[in-house]
Image (tube, helix red, strand yellow):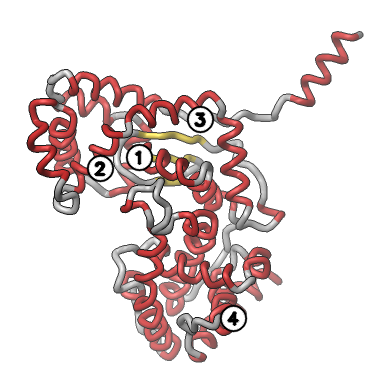
Amino acid sequence: MKLYILALALMFTVPVFAQTITDSSCTSYFEITDKLRKGDSLSRETWRGFLKDNAIQTYMADQGVGDSYYESYRKNMQIVYMPQKDSILQKRLKDPESYWLTYMIYQYKHNEQGMKAYLKRITEHPDTYFDACYQYAWSALPKRAQQKLPKYQFSIIPIHNDAHAQDNWIIYTLLCAYFNDLNRYGALGGHEMHHALRPQPDLKLEHRDESAATVFYVIMNEGTADMVDKKYMTDTATALLPSQRYFQEFFNEAKPVLPHLDSLLQVNAKSDTTIKRRDYLKGTPYTSGHVPGTYMAYYIEKNGLKAKLLPHIEDPFYFFMIYNEAAKKDKTKPFLFSKATMDYIEQMHKKYFIKRKAG
């Protein structure tokens, strides 16, 4: 009887699922770098074998790179790690903007011991890591969306510098995860989890509104997720590499993009002119929505309207409406969308969101 009671107790105290992070490609990478440090070259065959890792393939496919990039990466690996090429390395490190690939790979080399300790920490104590990620993700979600992701895979790969979410799979590059978790443990994961957890709108758009509404969505998509982590990625975040302190870059680029966006929306409101998503975001190299999403989210939160936004977290039109409300309140006078643009947004809000939701 005691054993039966104990078994029942264990059954109800063990978590329903235990999430883990796969980092097997990192082990392969460190095997390659150990040989390079001894002076061995990196053959094309070995490099191609390393790149066959499924997580690497999935992540790099999203980056849109080809064989020439991979070959350049292989050659730069040799320059960074092989002792006999150190003079070339030192010369390139003096000009990181011209030799960005060399600089990025060098960060993997320079921080290798810290990265190994970091991987050991999160693979041996995944619950601590995931708890931190969920807390950050939930900080910008309503209660109804504060759930977990038992069906998701999580991987860390030792190539490039970013993170990517696709098809129940979140993939971090080691360079991105390592520095971001030094800065705010779990915030990067929280950002990616936010994308997965935020409810998705079901919009059946007319052709004339399709491009504009898509831009609203991508800005809201990143803007709400940027509430999770971008405020920790400022110029004062010294744990991050300078190139990873995105907040000020996104914020500054938004200043000319917002009035440009406003002018095109006024044109779109009056005609059936087809304006492409790239045209709306002219003035920034990013088309993902971080610019101007970070800027808009900053003012929403600064002016105490985050709690008002969260119940409508999947509504791209409401994101713009609540931003304009925040901009009107702010004494620093951030950009304010025109009445014509807001009338157009409110018209689409009623047409595509309010009526559909009611139906």
The residue singled out by tag 3 in the image is 122
* Three-letter code, disc 3: Ile
Check disc 1 and report its element: helix, strand or loop: helix
Contact flag, marks 2 and 4 (Cβ < 8 Å): no
The residue singled out by tag 2 in the image is 104
Check disc 4 and report its element: helix, strand or loop: helix
Q: Is residue 348 visible?
A: no
Looking at marks 3 and 4 on the same chain, the residue that comes earlier in the sequence is marked by 3
Looking at marks 2 and 1 on the same chain, the residue that comes earlier in the sequence is marked by 2
- The quadrant holding residue 302 is bottom right
Q: Residue at x 63, y 51 (%)?
A: 138
Instruction: Report how far apart the C-alphas of labels 2 and 4 lie in the structure.
Output: 41 Å
The residue singled out by tag 1 in the image is 175
Q: Residue at x 38, y 30 (%)?
A: 114
- Where is residue 283 drawn, in percent x and y? 29, 73
- The quadrant holding residue 353 is bottom right
Against 222, residue 238 (above or below) is above
**Foreground residue, 98 or 151?**
98
63 on left or right of 16: left
Query: Quadrant of the image for the N terminus?
Result: top right
Contact flag, marks 2 and 1 (Cβ < 8 Å): yes
- The total number of labels drawn is 4
The residue singled out by tag 4 in the image is 325
Against 111, residue 42 (above or below) is above
Looking at marks 3 and 2 on the same chain, the residue that comes earlier in the sequence is marked by 2
Instruction: Report how far apart the C-alphas of labels 1 and 4 lie in the structure.
Output: 38 Å
- Where is residue 66 drawn, in percent x and y? 20, 44
- Where is residue 3 drawn, in percent x and y? 85, 8
- Where is residue 140 drawn, in percent x and y? 60, 57
- The quadrant holding residue 133 is top right
Q: Is residue 172 visible?
A: yes
Contact flag, marks 3 and 2 (Cβ < 8 Å): no
